[in-house]
Image (cartoon, rainbow, N blue to C red):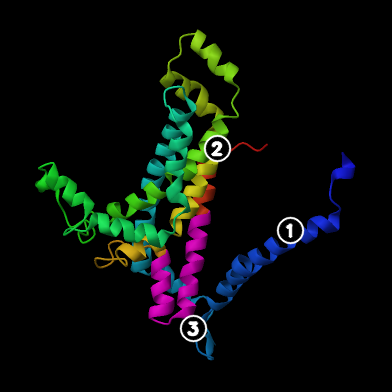
């Protein structure tokens, strides 16, 4: 068997392109952002070193903390929607209740491969008050009282922009949970059925405990993905009305490329990184992941 294993230099050669791409796309920009965050810089040739002033300003920036609060709401709704619904759908597909499982799995996963910009434009048309599918459906069902300015009402806009995020990525968590469920021995379910366990009891007493680490991974992925959400909201609302749907990534973008405060924008980016990492570590601590 050892003779079939590629030589070390072959493995290094195969991994090198991916390592180089990751270095130039992730590692290098990260260190550049750390460096720029200590400067007052508008993007031109002149850079003025100011130490920790950008971070002190960030700590007292109410717009940044408002956008952080918006991110937290999106993360919470996405954990419930993406992870929760993904688990329920995976349980249905893994059971004997649902027919045409491959078709259902393909249709649910399909939005994951679409561009976030495409999803944003699609849901903008759905939410449109004049010609949107949602308001047309409410009118058809004689529910005109429920018609709203879905993307223009500050009270509900954060929830309406989260719906496309949930819809697009349910399929990702469906696949994660489905692959984990298929690794559970069928004998366990068969013994439970002999003892009279129903589908709900099997889900709570067998599936959930055995998928604890899978849930941990899914929740960490959900937090990481939604803490840096940008594309969907930028396309649908641009952060408005006002700042009611502005998230941290968009605040960093506007600060850096609209107001040309590259140094402070880099500090905001580092703030996003630190807060995201803190939430991920906190979720791991609370859920108590198991080291294998």
Q: Confirm whether the magenta stretch covers residue 93.
A: no
Q: In which quadrant of the rendered image does the N terminus lie?
A: top right
Mark 3 or mark 1: name the one nearer the start of the chain: 1
Q: Nearer the viewer, mark 3 or mark 2?
A: 2
* Above or below 5: residue 241: below
- Structural crowding at the residue carrying mark 3, measured as other residues with C-alpha within 10 Å and reported as few (<14), some (14–19) or many (≥20): many
Does the rendering let one see residue 285? no
Q: Which mark is residue 214?
A: 2
Q: Residue at x 54, y 14 (%)?
A: 190
Q: Which residues are magenta?
A: 249-277
Quarter assignment of residue 143: top left
Q: In which quadrant of the rendered image does the C terminus lie?
A: top right
Q: Residue furthest right?
A: 3
Residue 152: x percent and y percent?
21, 61
- Distance between the Cα atoms at labels 2 and 1? 27 Å
Does dot 1 land on a helix, a strand or a loop? Answer: helix
Residue 205: x percent and y percent?
49, 21
Q: Nearer the viewer, mark 3 or mark 1?
A: 1
Mark 3 or mark 2: name the one nearer the start of the chain: 3
Tell me how many marks there are: 3
Q: Residue at x 47, y 63 (%)?
A: 272
- Structural crowding at the residue carrying mark 1, measured as other residues with C-alpha within 10 Å and reported as few (<14), some (14–19) or many (≥20): few
Q: Confirm whether the magenta stretch covers residue 272.
A: yes
Residue for badge 1: 15
Residue for badge 3: 40
Residue 85: x percent and y percent?
40, 38
Mark 2 or mark 1: name the one nearer the start of the chain: 1
* Above or below 27: residue 106: above
Q: Main secondary structure of the magenta part?
A: helix
Q: Are marks 3 and 2 in contact (CB under 8 Å)?
A: no
Does dot 3 land on a helix, a strand or a loop? Answer: strand
């Amino acid at each position: 068997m050892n003779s079939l294993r590629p030589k070390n230099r072959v493995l290094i050669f195969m991994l090198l392109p991916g390592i180089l791409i990751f270095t130039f796309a992730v590692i290098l920009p990260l260190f550049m952002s750390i460096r720029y965050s200590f400067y007052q810089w508008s993007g031109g040739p002149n850079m003025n070193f100011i130490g920790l002033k950008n971070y002190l300003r960030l700590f007292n920036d109410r717009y940044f903390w408002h956008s952080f609060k918006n991110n937290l709401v999106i993360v919470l709704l996405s954990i419930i929607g993406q992870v929760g619904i993904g688990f329920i759908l995976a349980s249905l597909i893994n059971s004997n209740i649902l027919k045409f499982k491959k078709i259902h799995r393909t249709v649910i996963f399909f939005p994951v491969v679409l561009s976030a910009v495409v999803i944003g434009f699609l849901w903008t048309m759905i939410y449109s008050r004049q010609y949107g599918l949602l308001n047309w459906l409410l009118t058809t069902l004689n529910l005109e009282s429920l018609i709203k300015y879905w993307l223009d009402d500050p009270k509900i806009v954060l929830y309406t922009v989260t719906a496309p995020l949930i819809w697009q990525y349910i399929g990702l968590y469906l696949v994660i949970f489905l692959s984990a469920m298929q690794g559970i021995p069928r004998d366990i379910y068969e013994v439970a059925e002999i003892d009279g366990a129903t589908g709900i009891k099997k889900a709570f007493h067998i599936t959930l405990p055995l998928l604890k680490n899978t849930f941990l991974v899914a929740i960490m992925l959900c937090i990481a993905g939604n803490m840096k959400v940008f594309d969907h909201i930028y396309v649908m609302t641009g952060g408005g009305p006002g700042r009611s749907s502005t998230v941290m990534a968009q605040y960093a973008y506007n600060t850096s490329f609209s107001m040309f405060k590259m140094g402070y924008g880099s500090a905001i980016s580092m703030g996003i990184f630190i807060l995201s990492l803190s939430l991920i570590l906190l979720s791991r601590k609370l859920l108590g992941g198991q080291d294998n």
